[in-house]
Amino acid sequence: MVAISSIQPRFISTFLGDCRFIHPSHRLFHCNPGNKHVSMQCSRTFSGLTGLLFSRRNVDELPNTNRKRLRPGQISPPRPVPEQIQRPPYVKSRKPPGIGSGSEVHDRKGIEKMRASGRLAAQVLQYAGTLVKPGIMTDEIDQSVHQMIIDNGAYPSPLGYGGFPKSVCTSVNECICHGIPDSRPLEDGDIINIDVTIYLNGYHGDTSATFFVGNVDEEAKTLVQVTKECLDKAISICAPGVEFNKIGKTIHDLADKYRFGVVEQFVGHGVGRAFHSDPVILHYRNNERGRMVVDQTFTIEPMLTIGSINGLIWDDDWTVVTEDGSLSAQFEHTILITNDGAEILTQC
């Protein structure tokens, strides 16, 4: 478990929290020093804040936009997975397993398995993107994604991770990450991040992208395009011996040019046999030590916002939205460090 006092408040990966805060006055995750495992706790005060927001008469109104604030819909039961499909070890425990000890550095066989899981994750994400249109419910996207994953003999990694109830994350508009698919239909002008992770032959492939729903305004288009460019530029500087903090500087420098915020509470991570492992990838400027090594795999997954970079968590204990309701976008790839650079594993 990584917990460095010099780092600003953040989460360890988009599914794990350390002993810091998502908001300065509200502790959401707790860990004991020296313990690799973390537990989630949502204080009554903080949990009640969400309810207060949703009970106000002007809850749907956002300043300077016709867009309405995101509200939770109905969540259907988790979808079944055939018994013969291999499951990650954490599924039965229903507890987040914490950061895996050590980095994911692979032999030739492991690299081929990472390529296979990454390729399938990319294909599933590409298919999910074709479903995005006004009127479709995010739960319908989850159903289709779930079916494609199990049809290919893989397991949807988010399902059962620390009790997460669905097979994919769907984060709409101001949702930074961890949106739970539900009954809310997508609306013209929305943006949606779809985060796909699959577990195939003992290895995870992790990727996400933000899609336009119908006719999207220019500000939202620019946010999404710049977020994608941040990911592409960050990957382009990766190679053996490069310091991990170069990733954060590259992303932050580009985001600053457009006056977009860079979310610090959620980070990238090693991925492979474990869903989350070292190294922790910070997307903002930092002085963290560590260098990339050949045959190592990890994710880069910047989240940019138009307004506040601070998040509020809903009562479902997963969905995180910007505190001011401003839009957020994210893109993610799993990459492999090669002798002369980086290979993107999660592309078709």
Image (cartoon, helix red, strand yellow):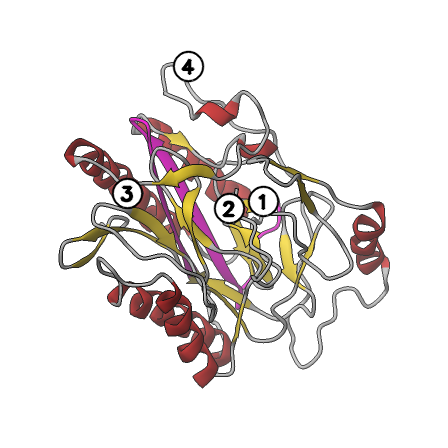
Q: Where is mark 3, residue-wise?
A: 118
Whether 88 is among the magenta residues is: no
Above or below, 340 against 124 in this view is: below
Residue at image position (71%, 50%) is 314
Element under label 2?
strand
**Which residue range is magenta in the image?**
181-210
Q: Earlier in the sequence, mark 3 or mark 4?
A: 4
Q: Where residue 203 appears, x then y in whole percent?
A: 32, 33
**Residue type for callout 4:** Glu
Residue 316: quarter of image: top right
Which amino acid, mark 1? Ile
Q: Which mark is residue 153?
A: none
Numbered tag placed on residue 169 in the rendering:
2
Q: Nearer the viewer, residue 277 or 305?
A: 277
| Residue at (69% x, 66% y) in the render | 323
Which residue lies under the disc numbered 4?
83
Instruction: Say if mark 3 contacts mark 4, CB within 8 Å.
Output: no
Q: Amino acid at mark 2?
A: Cys
Q: Residues within 10 Å of mark 3 (few under 14, many from 20)?
A: many
Where residue 171 appears, as percent x and y from the top left, is: 54, 54
Q: Quick check: marks 2 and 4 in contact, CB under 8 Å?
A: no
Can residue 165 be seen in this snapshot?
no
